[in-house]
Image (cartoon, helix red, strand yellow):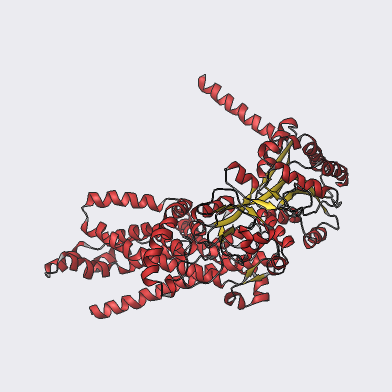
């Protein structure tokens, strides 16, 4: 450790001894300024985005206030706008998607990184990357032509008959709805979870595995108790990436969710999501209040992503602390 | 030498593009429904008059109205006439000068359905359509439907309603019709490009509605006539105000316009849903170009006036090939007179 510190000191620029102009001529300062501008522009763009959304959604804020979040009527003719069904739809579909995608994705990543022969792993990874690059409208078509009929004729009867007394499986099924959207979203986000998780698992140092094996653990024990906890933060990161994609997905969701702004307990019922309603109604939104209500929905989606990401980060911090406590 | 020739050809091609671009550019935006005929018209007009280049973006009626009001385009286009508030907003923005509506072609919305075991075309009364879309008629064998379809075996299956989820002129025509034939619809839902639908699933675009109907047994929805014809989608007949069951086609849509032509107001803002006339199809509508009354740029003004005159004369001959219905003669004559109002 000591050697590397001294080495760094020697290699670093000798600060204070040269003039600003000289540093500029050297290029160090130019590089620093340019990269600083690039880094700052990310923050600036985010701030400008929030500001723009905030300024352009003033009317609904004045007219509805917090009721905007609590009412579920969306009526462009009567100029009544409530965001609740859209927020509900966005959260439910994303939750369903993650419930399906997380176990599948992480399981697949563990197989690819730890158990599969390298050649198989690399080949499969190629196809997974291909899946991640498929445009979302294609997934929407897959949803409409394959998932929707399967949903109506197979999954719905299979769940409704034995569990129909549960509110989440009650009522009729049209094939489209929260669960269909969730399943299509799950298919879309699984490649992200697999790709990132696999990379993270592969980057776990070899000696961690070897130490576990040397202590007499089985292959699975070393994977599950040592490698996966080591890579936990990275795996969580892949899940947030998936969540962000699921929250904001527009085209595929609008094709299979049913586009009905209603709150229903049943996962088979049709619903609506924030991104879908903005895409659907923005071009024909004529009144100022109407247009600004759609922009306000955009702000809500932004905040939702922001809050969920924040919560997730807190979750990481809390769980890693717990982990180190147990370890210590 | 060969390389030089290639270079020269490239330069010449570039020059040609630049020269062609010298044409006066007139920008418009609006309705998607008449886009195929508009783009054909503008294309043909440009080959005949290379000095003018019309550029049309089909961004939706609402966006068309907004953009022409803000002055970002030279003209707009809409499937539903501008309302009084929108006209006032335009005048406020343009020092009191107004905007003119010019009907161009006609379209219609048709009921399409997928009922298990039924292959015969169905007939719908206004009460049946309003009841279904209000969610009050929930079974296919309801007397309101079965009464108009004697001989068709309709079973007690649940009706699934499908409507457009995106704001659209087709929804406007459909809800405009339902508001005219049902008091309850008018007070509860009313008309618009997007409304608060009492029941049903939403599909994005004509193709989204059609897809949902094909996928969902016992469903009913509505699409544009042109879309239904071009894609061979079966659709039903609707009872008109004279009591006849009429299936939408070019003749019955034109008949609806002809009936309305006699009472055409001077500003052309007229709804022809539920039109009188023996053969009139009741869910028909004009689509309009929105032309500002006053132009700063006289070149653009003359170009638009020239185009309108051409559209009303020769342009009308090419609309039926694209399954749009022609304007009635009376309307064409009235519009020709109105062109002089553009200053």
Q: Residue at x 85, y 52 (%)?
A: B265
Q: Is residue A196 left or right of residue B89?
A: left
Quadrant assignment, res B197:
bottom right
List the single residue furthest toward the front.
B151
In this orientation, which residue lies closer to the viewer: A229 or B146?
B146
Quadrant assignment, res B320:
top right
In this orientation, which residue lies closer to the viewer: A204 or B228?
B228
In this orientation, which residue lies closer to the viewer: A98 or A181?
A181
- Residue B53 rendering spot, x and y as whole percentages: 72, 38
Q: How many marks?
A: 0
Q: Residue at x 62, y 54 (%)?
A: B149
- Residue B309 rendering spot, x and y as whole percentages: 81, 38
Q: Is residue A267 left or right of residue B203?
A: left
In this rendering, does residue A50 appear at all? no
In this orientation, which residue lies closer to the viewer: A105 or B137?
B137
List the single residue furthest toward the top.
B1
- Residue A146 rendering spot, x and y as whole percentages: 42, 53
Q: Is residue A170 left or right of residue B177?
A: left
- Residue A264 rendering spot, x and y as whole percentages: 50, 72
Q: Considering only vertical position in the picture, is B13 above or below A325?
A: above
Q: Residue at x 55, y 51 (%)?
A: B210
Q: Is residue A239 left or right of residue A270?
A: left
In this rendering, does residue B174 appear at all? yes
Quadrant assignment, res A157:
bottom left
Q: Considering only vertical position in the picture, is A94 above or below A118?
A: below
């Amino acid at each position: 450790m000591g050697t590397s510190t001294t080495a760094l000191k020697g290699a670093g620029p000798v600060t204070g001894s040269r003039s600003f102009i000289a540093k500029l001529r050297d290029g160090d300062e130019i590089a620093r300024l340019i990269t600083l501008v690039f880094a700052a522009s990310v923050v600036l763009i985010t701030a400008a985005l929030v500001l723009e959304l905030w300024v352009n959604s003033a009317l609904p804020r004045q007219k509805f206030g917090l009721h905007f979040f609590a009412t579920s009527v969306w009526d462009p003719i009567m100029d009544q706008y409530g965001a609740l069904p859209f927020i509900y739809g966005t959260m439910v579909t994303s939750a369903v998607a993650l419930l399906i995608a997380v176990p599948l994705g992480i399981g697949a990543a563990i197989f690819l990184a730890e158990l599969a022969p390298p050649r198989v792993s690399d080949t499969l990874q190629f196809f997974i990357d291909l899946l991640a690059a498929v445009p979302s409208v294609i997934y929407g078509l897959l949803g409409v032509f394959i998932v929707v009929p399967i949903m109506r004729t197979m999954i719905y009867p299979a769940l409704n008959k034995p569990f129909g007394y549960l509110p989440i499986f009650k009522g009729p099924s049209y094939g489209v709805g929260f669960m269909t959207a969730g399943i299509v979203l799950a298919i879309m986000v699984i490649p992200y979870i697999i790709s990132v998780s696999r990379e993270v698992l592969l980057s776990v140092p070899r000696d961690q595995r070897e130490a576990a094996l040397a202590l007499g653990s089985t292959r699975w024990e070393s994977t599950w108790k040592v490698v996966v906890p080591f890579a936990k933060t990275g795996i969580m990161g892949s899940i947030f990436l998936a969540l962000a994609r699921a929250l904001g997905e527009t085209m595929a969701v609008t094709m299979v969710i049913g586009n009905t702004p209603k709150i229903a307990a049943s996962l088979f019922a049709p619903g609506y999501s924030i991104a879908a309603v903005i895409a659907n109604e923005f071009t024909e939104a004529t009144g100022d209040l109407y247009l600004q209500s759609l922009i306000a929905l955009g702000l809500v989606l932004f905040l939702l992503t922001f809050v969920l990401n924040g919560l997730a980060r807190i979750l990481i911090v809390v769980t890693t602390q717990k982990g180190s406590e147990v370890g210590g | 030498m060969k390389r030089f020739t290639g270079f020269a050809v490239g330069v010449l091609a570039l020059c040609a593009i630049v020269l062609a671009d010298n044409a006066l550019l007139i920008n418009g935006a609006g309705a998607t429904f008449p886009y195929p005929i508009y783009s054909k018209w503008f294309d043909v007009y440009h080959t005949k008059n290379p000095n003018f280049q019309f550029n049309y973006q089909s961004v939706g009626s609402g966006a068309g109205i907004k953009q022409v009001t803000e002055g970002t385009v030279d003209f707009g286009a809409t499937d539903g006439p501008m309302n009084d508030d929108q006209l006032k907003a335009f005048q406020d923005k343009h020092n009191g000068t107004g905007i003119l509506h010019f009907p161009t072609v006609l379209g219609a919305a048709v009921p399409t359905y997928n009922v298990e075991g039924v292959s015969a075309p169905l007939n719908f009364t206004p009460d049946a359509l309003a009841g279904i879309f209000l969610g009050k008629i929930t079974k296919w064998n309801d007397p309101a439907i079965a009464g108009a379809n004697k001989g068709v075996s309709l079973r007690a299956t649940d009706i699934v309603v499908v409507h457009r989820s995106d704001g659209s002129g087709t929804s406007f025509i459909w809800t405009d019709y339902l508001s005219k034939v049902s008091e309850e619809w008018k007070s509860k839902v009313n008309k618009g490009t997007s409304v608060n639908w009492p029941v049903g699933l939403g599909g994005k675009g004509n193709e989204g509605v059609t897809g949902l109907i094909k996928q969902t047994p016992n469903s009913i929805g509505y699409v544009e006539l042109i879309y239904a014809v071009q894609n061979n989608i079966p659709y039903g007949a609707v009872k008109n105000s004279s009591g006849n069951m009429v299936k939408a086609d070019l003749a019955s849509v034109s008949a609806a316009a002809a009936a309305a032509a006699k009472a055409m107001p001077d500003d052309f803002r007229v709804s022809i849903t539920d039109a009188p006339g023996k053969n009139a199809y009741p869910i028909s509508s004009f689509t309009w170009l929105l032309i500002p009354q006053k132009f700063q740029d006289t070149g653009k003004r003359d170009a638009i006036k020239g185009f309108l005159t051409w559209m009303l004369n020769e342009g009308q001959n090419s609309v039926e090939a694209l399954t749009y219905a022609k304007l009635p003669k009376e309307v064409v004559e009235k519009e020709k007179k109105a062109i002089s109002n553009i200053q």
